[in-house]
C-alpha cells in the first residue's frame, strides 16, 4: 500500500509540474488534488503544510489565495534565497581571473560597441521619485533568486559598486574594455523636451580628453514611467516631441558629435534612436537633423534606428541603418512552465538562452543594413522581482558562441565601413546584461569577448606578417602648444590602426610643452599604444617646422609616414582609412577632407573655415585634383598628408620654406604620381591666434616670395615635360594654365 501511495504522489507531482498552466492556475489545481486525494498522502509533511495554509486562508478571495504557498515550500524558498546571498559573496567554480594579455585591436578586427548605462550615481530626480541616494545599485543589491541555481543577486568586482561622478571609474572601465577588445561605448542619452537626465557621466567624459576611447550616443526617446513598479501609465517625465524639440535636441547633441573621439560610420557621426516609430513624423525629424548638421559644419550624420517594439526597417523613415537590441526579437521559446519557480508571486516569463544561440535565427537576412547585437544575458528581476523576464542558461561560453557567429556573419555580409557589432551591454547590472566582471564568472564575459575576436581573425600568420609591413610613423613637430599637445598625442594613440610609432620633435618651446610631453610619453597607457616605440627629440634652438619634420624622417621606421601638427587632432580611424586608400589606389600620397575646430576642440566655421571648406569642395568639380591643387594648397596642412616612405626617395625631403613647405612637397609628389583625396573628414585643423595661417597673412612679402619660387619651379618642370604623372597633360591643356606654362 505504501508503494501505491508513493506512486500516486509522484504521478500527481509530475502531472502538476508538466501542466501548461500559469503558476496561479497550478496552485488552484494543486488545491483541488489535495482536497480530493489528500487521504493518500495525509501523513506527509507536504500535505500537512498545505492543509494548514489552506485552512487558514480558505476564507480569502481567490485572487489573494494564489500568492499563498505551503510552509514547506516557503521555507524552501527562504533557504534558496539565503544560500544565494551567501554564495554571491564567494567566487564560484566558474570564476575567471583577470588576464595578463591584451587583445591589441587591429584595423581588420570587428569593432565592438557596448551600450552603456549612465545611471550609477544619485541625482535629484531619482531622489524625488525613488528616495534619496537611489541609483541602479539600489535595484541590483535587492535582487533575489526565483529558482534553484538562479544567478541573483549579481554583484560586481574590480570596479565595484561605483559612482560615475568619479572620473577614475571611467578610466578603469576603459582600461578593461581596451584590454579585452571592446572598441567603444554607446552611452544611453536622456533628453525630455530640453530637460537632460543622467548627463553628468557623459559630460565628464566629454571634458576629460585623457579618456581616449571612442564613444557615441543612443537617445532613449520614450517616456520615463514607474515601469519598475509595474505602473506603465504613471509617467515620471514625458517626451515633448515637436519640430522645435527636434532642432533643440540636435543642437545640444552637436557638441558631442564634434568631439574627435566620437564614433563615425563612413566618416559620419553615428546617432542611434531607440524608438523612431513613436516620433510624430520620423521622416521630418530626420530631415531637420540632417539639414542642421550640414549647415552647422558637422556635415552628414549616420542615423540608426533600433529594432524595438516591432520596428524592422527604420530606413523607411529616412534612417541609414538599423541596430538590433536584444532581448527584442530573440529567437527562443518560453520555458517558464518547465522551470520550478520557487517564488510564489512570480508572474514573469523565462526563455531559453541556449536555444537562441544554437538556433542561429539571428543570422537571417535583414530587410536593410543592420548592425547585429549580442547580449551576455538578460534578467531584469532586479528591477521587476515578480514580473521580470529571464533568459535561462546564459553563460560566457554560449555568449562567446553567439558573438563568434555574429562577427563571422558581419565580416562576410557587410562592407569594410560597416564592420560594427554591438553588445547589450557593458553595465546593465539590474537587467542581468553586463560585460563588467562579477562574483560568479569573474572576468568570464570579457575573456569570452577577447577570445571571440582572436578566433575570428582570418589568417593569424598572414595578418602578423602584414602588420610588420604596415608600421606607420607619426611625426609630431611641437612648438609652444602646451594647451593642445596632450589632446593631440591622445588622438594619435587612440587610432584604430594599432601598429604605429611616434616621433615628437620639440622645436625649442618656451612654454610648458616639453614638461607635458615628458609626462605623457612615460605613462604605460601611451607606451602600450605605440608598439613601434616613442622617440622624443628636443632642440636647443628653433630650427623651423621643415627641419623638425626632416629630422623625424631620418629616424622613421614606418612603411607609411604621416605628420600631425601638435595643435591639431586626428579622427580615431584616420590612419586606417588613409592606408586603405593608398593600398586600394596604389598611390604614394593621400590627404583627406578637413574639419576646422576652435581652441576648445569644437567645430568652428568662421571665415577661414569657410575658405578651407570651399577649396576642398572645388576638387569635386574637376576630373582630377591637379587643377585645383596647382592653384592652391587644397590639402590645407602638412598634418593632413599620409605618404609612403618610398616617396621620400623619389622626391626628397621637405624644403626650407617657412610657410608653404607642405604645398611644395605635395606639388613635387604630384609630378610623380596622382595623389588621392579622401572625401571624409579624418583631420581636425585647429584655428587659433598663433597658427601658421595667421602668420602667413601677416608676412605677405615672404609668403609671396615663397609662392613665386615654388610655382616657378613647378611651371618649369611642366613646360619641360619633367614629370611621370600621365594626368598632368590635362592640366597643361587647361585654359587657366596654358598661358602661364608658355
Image (cartoon, helix red, strand yellow):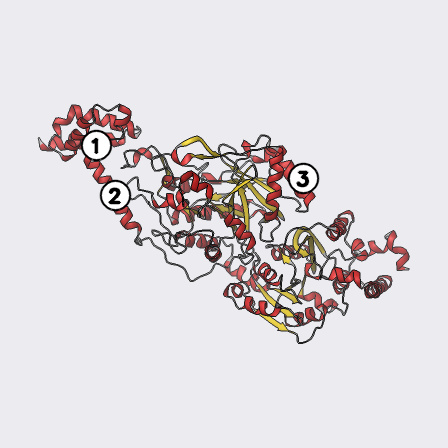
The Cα atoms of the two marked residues, 3 and 1, are separated by: 66 Å
Left or right of residue 457, residue 503 in this image: right
**Secondary structure type for disc 3:** helix
Q: Position of residue 416 (x, y in %)?
A: 59, 49
* Label of residue 649 in the image: none
> Which quarter of the figure has residue 346?
top left
Q: Position of residue 228 (x, y in %)?
A: 40, 36
Let me know if residue 230 appears in the view.
yes
User: Are the residues tagged 1 and 2 within 8 Å (C-beta)?
Assistant: no
Determine which residue is flagged by label 1. 13
Q: Identify the residue shown where x is 56% and y is 68%.
A: 533
Left or right of residue 326, residue 81 in this image: left
**As rendered, which of 63 and 35 lies closer to the eye?**
63
The Cα atoms of the two marked residues, 3 and 2, are separated by: 58 Å
Determine which residue is flagged by label 2. 80
Q: Nearer the viewer, mark 3 or mark 1?
A: 3
Furthest toward the left, the residue is: 1
Q: Identify the residue shown where x is 61% and y is 68%.
A: 512
Quadrant of the drawing holding the N terminus: top left
**As rendered, which of 562 and 234 lies closer to the eye?**
234
Quadrant of the drawing holding the C terminus: bottom right
- Disc 1 packing (10 Å; few <14; some 14–19; many ≥20): few
The Cα atoms of the two marked residues, 1 and 2, are separated by: 20 Å
Q: Earlier in the sequence, mark 1 or mark 2?
A: 1
* Count of numbered circles on the image: 3
Residue 255 drawn above or below residue 472: above
Let me know if residue 266 appears in the view.
no
Determine which residue is flagged by label 3. 291
Q: Position of residue 133 (x, y in %)?
A: 40, 46
User: Are the residues tagged 3 and 2 within 8 Å (C-beta)?
Assistant: no
Amino acid at each position: 500500500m505504501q508503494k501505491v501511495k508513493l506512486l500516486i504522489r509522484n504521478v500527481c507531482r509530475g502531472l502538476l509540474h508538466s501542466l501548461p498552466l500559469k503558476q496561479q492556475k497550478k496552485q488552484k489545481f494543486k488545491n483541488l488534488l489535495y482536497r480530493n486525494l489528500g487521504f493518500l498522502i495525509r501523513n506527509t509533511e507536504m500535505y500537512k503544510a498545505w492543509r494548514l495554509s489552506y485552512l487558514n486562508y480558505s476564507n480569502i478571495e481567490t485572487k489573494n489565495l494564489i500568492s499563498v504557498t505551503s510552509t514547506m515550500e516557503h521555507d524552501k524558498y527562504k533557504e534558496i534565497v539565503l544560500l544565494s546571498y551567501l554564495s554571491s559573496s564567494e567566487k564560484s567554480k566558474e570564476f575567471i581571473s583577470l588576464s595578463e594579455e591584451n587583445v591589441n585591436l587591429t584595423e581588420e578586427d570587428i569593432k565592438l560597441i557596448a551600450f552603456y548605462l549612465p545611471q550609477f550615481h544619485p541625482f535629484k530626480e531619482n531622489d524625488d521619485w525613488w528616495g534619496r541616494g537611489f541609483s541602479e545599485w539600489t535595484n541590483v543589491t535587492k535582487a533575489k533568486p526565483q529558482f534553484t541555481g538562479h544567478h541573483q543577486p549579481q554583484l560586481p568586482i574590480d570596479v565595484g559598486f561605483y559612482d560615475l561622478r568619479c572620473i577614475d571609474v571611467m578610466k578603469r572601465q576603459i582600461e578593461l574594455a581596451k584590454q579585452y577588445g571592446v572598441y567603444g561605448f554607446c552611452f544611453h542619452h536622456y533628453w525630455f523636451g530640453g530637460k537632460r537626465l543622467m548627463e553628468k557621466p557623459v559630460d565628464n567624459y566629454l571634458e576629460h580628453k585623457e579618456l581616449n576611447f571612442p564613444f557615441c550616443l543612443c537617445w532613449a526617446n520614450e517616456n520615463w514611467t514607474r515601469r519598475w513598479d509595474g505602473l506603465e501609465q504613471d509617467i515620471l517625465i514625458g517626451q515633448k516631441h515637436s519640430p522645435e524639440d527636434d532642432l533643440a535636441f540636435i543642437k545640444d547633441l552637436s557638441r558631442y558629435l564634434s568631439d574627435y573621439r566620437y564614433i563615425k560610420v563612413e566618416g559620419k557621426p553615428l546617432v542611434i534612436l531607440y524608438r523612431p516609430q513613436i516620433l510624430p513624423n520620423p521622416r521630418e525629424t530626420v530631415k531637420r537633423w540632417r539639414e542642421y548638421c550640414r549647415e552647422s559644419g558637422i556635415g552628414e550624420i549616420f542615423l540608426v534606428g533600433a529594432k524595438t517594439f516591432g520596428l524592422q526597417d527604420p530606413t523607411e523613415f529616412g534612417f541609414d541603418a538599423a541596430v538590433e537590441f536584444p532581448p527584442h526579437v530573440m529567437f527562443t521559446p518560453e520555458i517558464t512552465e518547465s522551470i520550478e519557480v520557487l517564488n510564489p508571486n512570480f508572474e514573469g516569463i523565462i526563455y531559453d538562452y541556449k536555444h537562441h544561440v544554437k538556433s542561429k535565427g539571428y543570422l537571417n537576412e535583414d530587410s536593410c543594413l543592420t548592425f547585429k547585437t549580442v547580449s551576455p544575458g538578460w534578467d531584469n528581476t532586479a528591477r521587476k522581482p515578480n514580473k521580470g523576464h529571464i533568459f535561462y542558461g546564459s553563460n560566457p561560453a554560449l555568449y562567446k558562441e553567439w558573438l563568434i557567429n555574429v562577427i563571422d556573419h558581419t565580416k562576410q555580409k557587410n562592407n569594410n565601413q560597416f564592420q560594427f557589432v554591438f553588445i547589450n551591454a557593458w553595465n546593465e547590472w539590474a537587467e542581468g546584461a553586463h560585460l563588467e566582471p562579477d562574483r560568479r564568472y569573474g572576468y568570464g564575459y570579457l575573456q569570452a569577448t577577447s577570445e571571440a575576436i582572436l578566433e575570428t581573425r582570418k589568417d593569424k600568420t598572414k595578418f602578423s606578417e602584414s602588420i610588420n609591413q604596415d608600421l606607420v610613423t607619426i611625426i609630431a613637430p611641437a612648438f609652444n602648444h602646451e594647451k593642445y599637445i596632450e589632446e593631440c598625442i591622445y588622438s594619435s594613440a587612440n587610432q584604430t590602426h594599432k601598429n604605429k610609432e611616434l616621433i615628437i620633435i620639440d622645436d625649442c618651446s618656451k612654454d610648458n610643452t616639453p614638461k607635458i610631453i615628458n609626462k605623457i610619453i612615460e605613462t604605460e597607457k601611451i607606451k602600450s599604444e605605440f608598439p613601434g616605440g616613442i622617440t622624443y627629440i628636443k632642440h636647443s634652438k628653433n630650427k623651423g617646422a621643415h627641419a623638425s619634420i626632416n629630422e623625424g624622417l631620418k629616424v622613421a621606421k614606418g612603411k607609411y609616414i604621416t605628420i600631425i601638427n601638435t595643435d591639431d587632432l586626428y579622427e580615431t580611424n584616420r590612419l586606417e582609412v588613409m592606408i586603405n586608400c593608398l593600398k586600394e589606389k596604389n598611390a604614394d600620397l593621400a590627404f583627406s577632407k578637413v574639419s576646422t575646430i576652435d581652441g576648445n576642440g569644437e567645430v568652428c566655421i568662421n571665415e577661414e573655415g569657410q575658405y578651407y571648406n570651399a577649396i576642398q569642395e572645388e576638387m569635386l568639380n574637376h576630373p582630377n585634383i591637379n587643377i585645383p591643387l596647382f592653384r592652391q594648397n587644397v590639402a590645407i596642412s602638412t598634418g593632413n598628408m599620409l605618404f609612403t616612405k618610398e616617396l621620400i626617395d623619389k622626391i626628397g625631403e621637405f624644403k626650407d620654406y617657412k610657410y608653404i613647405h607642405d604645398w611644395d612637397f605635395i606639388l613635387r609628389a604630384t609630378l610623380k604620381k596622382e595623389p588621392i583625396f579622401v572625401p571624409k573628414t579624418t583631420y581636425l585643423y585647429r584655428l587659433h591666434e598663433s597658427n601658421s595661417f595667421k602668420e602667413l597673412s601677416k608676412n605677405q612679402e615672404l609668403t609671396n616670395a615663397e609662392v613665386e619660387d615654388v610655382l616657378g619651379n613647378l611651371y618649369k618642370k611642366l613646360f619641360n615635360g619633367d614629370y611621370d604623372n600621365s594626368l598632368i597633360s590635362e592640366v597643361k591643356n587647361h585654359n587657366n594654365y596654358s598661358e602661364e606654362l608658355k
